[in-house]
Structure formats: C-alpha cells, structure tokens
C-alpha cells in the first residue's frame, strides 16, 4: 500500500500517507462512535511522520480517556469531516479515519477494540482479535 491519499468532504484538507499502516482497527468506544456518527470508527493507524496534511484543521482536546492523557481529535475547519486523532498516550502514531481515504476499500479491519462498548446489534467477524478495552 506504499502511498495512500485522502481528505475531507469539501476538499479543503488533503493528506498523504507513506508506507504500510501499522494496523487497521475498529474502535467501539463511545467517543469514536460520537466522532464518526456511527456504531464504530474504522481507523488506519500509521506512524505520525508518515502523514503529510494540507489545509486547516480544527482540534478538539478529548480528555475523557482511559489513560487520562488527551486525544486531539482533528477535523476539517470548513466542513467538519473528522480526519485523524493524535493520542498523547501514543505520540508516535496518527489514527486516521479510514472513510476519509480516496480508496477506503483497501482497509480491511484486523482488530476490534473497546468491544465492551459495542452496540448489541454489531456483529464482529469470527476469528478477528477483539479486546474489551485497549490492548495491553
């Protein structure tokens, strides 16, 4: 997957990811549900230095975290599309919303986290690793 491009709904924010993702994870936590506006969020985890972004993003500092360390949730300052999250607990990674990629079908989830918060009607595929909270 050496290069991935994506951006927001209005086109004001664009990004390029180089190298393969570290993981593609589905997060079922209530914060990710609210940010995605859906039952869960599909996230592409990459090294922070592998992401180049152009355009103006707004940042909301989410302090309602298990670690107590903030997560910076960044979204397009114009249209509000969520783009990425930066966690103080994992400062070397960027957590990019898979749905913002130009070709999101490339990202097949390999892990589910925060399954303790999963909505009761969500079916997690058999055989995929799943964790009630963040993996240790």
Image (cartoon, rainbow, N blue to C red):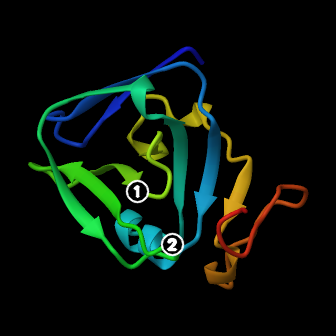
What residue is disc 1 on?
Answer: 88
Mark 1, residues whose alpha carbon is within 10 Å: few (<14), some, or many (≥20)?
A: some
Residue at x 65% of width, y 66% of height: 134
Badge 2 marks a residue whose secondary structure is loop
Residue at x 52% of width, y 77% of height: 66
Vertical order, 30 against 128 (above or below): below
Tell which circle, 2 or 1, labels the residue nearer the N-terminal end: 2
- Residue 68, by quadrant, is bottom left
What residue is disc 2 on?
Answer: 67
Q: Position of residue 132 (x, y in %)?
A: 72, 75
Q: Position of residue 90 (x, y in %)?
A: 50, 51
Q: Is 68 left, or right, of 133 in this rendering?
A: left
Q: Is 40 left, or right, of 64 in this rendering?
A: right
Q: Position of residue 30 (x, y in %)?
A: 48, 78
Callout 2 touching callout 1 (CB < 8 Å)? yes
Vertical order, 29 against 27 (above or below): below
Mark 2, residues whose alpha carbon is within 10 Å: few (<14), some, or many (≥20)?
A: few
Vertical order, 83 against 14 (above or below): below
């Amino acid at each position: 997957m050496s290069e991935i491009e994506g951006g927001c709904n209005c086109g004001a924010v664009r990004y390029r990811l180089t190298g393969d993702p570290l993981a593609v994870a589905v997060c079922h936590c209530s914060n990710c549900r609210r940010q995605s506006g859906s039952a869960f969020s599909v996230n592409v985890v990459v090294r922070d230095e592998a992401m180049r972004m152009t355009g103006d993003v707004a940042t909301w500092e989410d302090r309602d975290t298990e670690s107590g360390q903030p997560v910076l949730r960044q979204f397009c300052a114009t249209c509000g599309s969520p783009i990425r999250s930066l966690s103080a607990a994992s400062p070397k990674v960027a957590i990019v919303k898979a749905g913002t990629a130009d070709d999101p079908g490339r990202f097949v989830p390999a892990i589910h986290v925060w399954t303790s918060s999963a909505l009761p009607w969500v079916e997690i595929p058999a055989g995929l690793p799943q964790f009630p909270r963040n993996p240790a």
